[in-house]
């Protein structure tokens, strides 16, 4: 119901306990993984920017990974959100997240970039072409030992060219 969605999103906001935020982000991630019909109710700008807030403010790697995964899944369901998300965070924040030590966060951001490139090519390319070093870093990710990360980076590079 709309009340439950509102409650989950409200718990992602500033001031909530990180354990509560983690359960809410995990709930969104699980719903987005299993029920496209219900997940579309979470695929809104309000939800993605609430998840972004959690991602930016938390120092808890597990919470940050869950928020990134939920973001990627929602952006795949509502593809215009991927472009809106990239435009909002900009190239510098994109680069920062691609430089994370967590490969799950890197993969989540590459998923969002790839979704944006497929569905909003010109606008997504503009963010990638900002003078931030995002593209050179994606090239370096393509040389990583982690095969999934390497594959996603190669897809990104193929979409850019």
Image (spheres, rainbow, N blue to C red):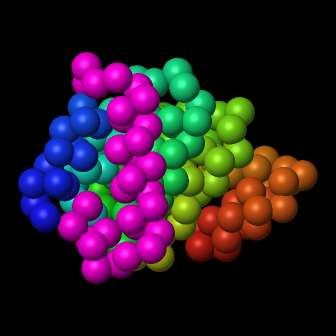
- Is residue 26 rendered magenta in the image? yes
- Say which of 63 and 150 sits in front: 63
Measured as percent of width and height from the top left, residue 46 is found at 19, 49
Q: Is residue 44 above or below residue 120?
A: above
Q: Residue at x 51, y 35 (%)?
A: 63
Height in image: 144 above or below 18?
below
Q: Nearer the viewer, residue 63 or 125?
A: 63
Residue 36 screen position, x and y as percent:
35, 78
Let me know if residue 41 appears in the view.
yes
Image location (x, y in percent) of residue 121: 42, 71
Where does residue 136 sit, x and y in percent of width and height?
Answer: 69, 46
User: The magenta stretch spans which residues?
Assistant: 14-42
Q: Is residue 89 left or right of residue 37?
A: right
Tell me if 121 is positioned left or right of 50 in this view.
right
Q: As drawn, which residue projects farthest toward the left?
A: 3
Magenta span includes 108: no
Residue drawn at x 69%, y 64% is: 152
**Quarter of the image where one finds residue 157:** bottom right
The residue at 55%/62% (across/down) is: 111
> Going 41% across and 42% down the picture, which residue do you hit?
23
Q: Quadrant of the N terminus?
A: bottom left
Q: Main secondary structure of the magenta part?
A: helix
The tally of labels here is 0
Say whether residue 121 is visible: no
Left-right relation of 123 to 2:
right
Query: For the view shown, which residue lies furthest in the bottom direction?
Result: 37
The C terminus: image quadrant:
bottom right
In this rendering, the answer to whether 20 lies above or below 79 is: above
Residues 157 and 57: in front is 57
Q: Where 119 falls versus 139 (above or below)?
A: below
């Amino acid at each position: 119901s709309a009340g439950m969605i509102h409650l989950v999103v409200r718990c992602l906001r500033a001031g909530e306990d990180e354990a509560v935020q983690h359960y809410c982000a995990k709930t969104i991630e699980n719903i987005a993984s299993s029920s496209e019909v219900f997940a579309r109710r979470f695929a809104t700008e309000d939800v993605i920017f609430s998840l972004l807030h959690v991602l930016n403010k938390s120092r808890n790697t597990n919470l940050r990974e869950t928020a990134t995964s939920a973001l990627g899944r929602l952006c795949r369901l509502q593809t215009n959100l991927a472009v809106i998300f990239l435009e909002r965070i900009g190239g510098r924040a994109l680069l920062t997240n691609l430089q994370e030590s967590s490969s799950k966060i890197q993969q989540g951001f590459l998923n969002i970039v790839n979704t944006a490139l497929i569905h909003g090519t010109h606008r997504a390319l503009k963010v990638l072409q900002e003078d931030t070093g995002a593209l050179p870093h994606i090239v370096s990710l393509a040389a990583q030992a982690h095969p999934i990360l390497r594959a996603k980076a190669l897809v990104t590079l193929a979409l850019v060219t």
